[in-house]
Image (cartoon, rainbow, N blue to C red):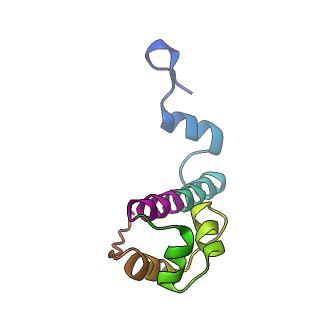
Amino acid sequence: MKKGKNNLTSFAEHLDSQYGKRGSTSREKYEQEFEAFRLGVMLQELRKEKGLTQEELAEKCGTTKTYISRIENNASDIRLSTLMRIIQEGLGGHLKLSVDL
């Protein structure tokens, strides 16, 4: 691992060191888990911005408080249809997706 000024390493170098280069099995697993974590945090922040409790959000989109909690805490995979319902019906937003190749 190369050290920059002041013997610091970049975050990308740290990830390469800890999880392997992009494309490796362990790095891909890390990247997938990180995206799930980001999604949970994003939903939690949006819910709080709207002034909703987990229970209120669940009620609005036809799911349970437990399920919302599991998503926010990265303990559950989420179906696209459910994510769309949470965003549209629960939060009043629109989901936009993008793909990086």
Along the viewing direction, whichever of 23 and 57 lies nearer the viewer: 57
Residue 22 on the magenta span: no
Residue 23: % across, % down: 55, 55
Q: Is residue 96 left or right of residue 76?
A: left
Q: Residue at x 52, y 34 (%)?
A: 13
Along the viewing direction, whichever of 58 and 32 lies nearer the viewer: 58
Q: Residue at x 36, y 74 (%)?
A: 95
Q: Is residue 35 above or below residue 22?
A: below
Residue farthest along the top direction in this orientation: 6
Number of callouts: 0
Please identify the dominant SS of the magenta region: helix
Q: Quadrant of residue 87?
A: bottom left
Q: Is residue 45 left or right of residue 77?
A: left
Residue 73: % across, % down: 62, 60
Residue 46 on the magenta span: yes
Residue 3: % across, % down: 51, 20
Residue 45: % across, % down: 44, 58
Q: Quadrant of the N terminus?
A: top right
Q: Residue at x 47, y 64 (%)?
A: 43
Q: Quadrant of the C terminus?
A: bottom left
Q: Quadrant of residue 19?
A: top right
First to last magenta residue range: 38-50
Along the viewing direction, whichever of 57 and 8 lies nearer the viewer: 57
